Image: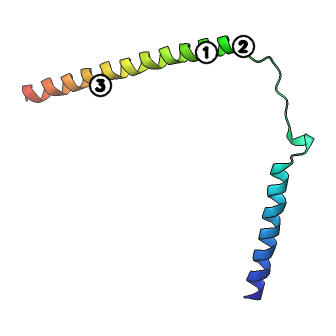
Amino acid sequence: MMCLTGQLAQCCDRQMELEKQIENPDHDRVRLVGGKDLKPVEVQKKIDDVSVLFQYQCGFTDVKYCFDFVCRLFSTEQN
């Protein structure tokens, strides 16, 4: 039991150390990414483009689902 208590204390201490490292990261943990940030208007345009593509894809999925349903309906009626 004493061994487990000692291991628990070590784990708690290690957890505290790791939490402090997360709060105050060293400079070697930071990675700068090259390039430039988009302007808010450009970001909004990209979001709108992705939204249109998503809506198109959802519509395509709905059409495919309906087509599959009708095919199954006709195949069961013919049998």
Q: Nearer the viewer, mark 3 or mark 2?
A: 2
Most extreme residue toward the front, as rendered?
A: 40
Give the answer, above or below, for where 4 lies relative to 70. below
How many residues crowd mark 2 within 10 Å: few (<14), some (14–19), many (20+)? few
- The residue lying at 19 percent from left, 22 percent from top is 70
* Gap between marks 1 and 2 measured at Cα: 9 Å
Q: What kind of residue is marked 2? A: Lys
Quadrant in the picture for residue 15: bottom right
* Gap between marks 1 and 3 measured at Cα: 31 Å
Quadrant where the C terminus sits is: top left
In terms of depth relative to the viewer, which is nearer, 40 or 19?
40
Residue topped by disc 1: 44
Q: Nearer the viewer, mark 1 or mark 3?
A: 1
Q: Check disc 1 and report its element: helix, strand or loop.
A: helix
- The residue lying at 82 percent from left, 68 percent from top is 13
Residue topped by disc 3: 65
Q: What kind of residue is marked 3? A: Tyr
- The residue lying at 31 percent from left, 18 percent from top is 63
Residue 77, numbered circle: none
Give the answer, above or below, for where 48 lies relative to 69. above
Q: Check disc 3 and report its element: helix, strand or loop.
A: helix
Give the answer, above or below, for where 76 lies relative to 42. below
First in sequence: mark 1 vs mark 2:
2
Place of residue 32 in the rendered image (x, y in percent of width and height, measured from the top left): 85, 29
Residue 39, numbered circle: 2
Q: Check disc 2 and report its element: helix, strand or loop.
A: loop
Place of residue 38 in the rendered image (x, y in percent of width and height, measured from the top left): 72, 15
How many residues crowd mark 1 within 10 Å: few (<14), some (14–19), many (20+)? few
* Gap between marks 3 and 2 measured at Cα: 39 Å
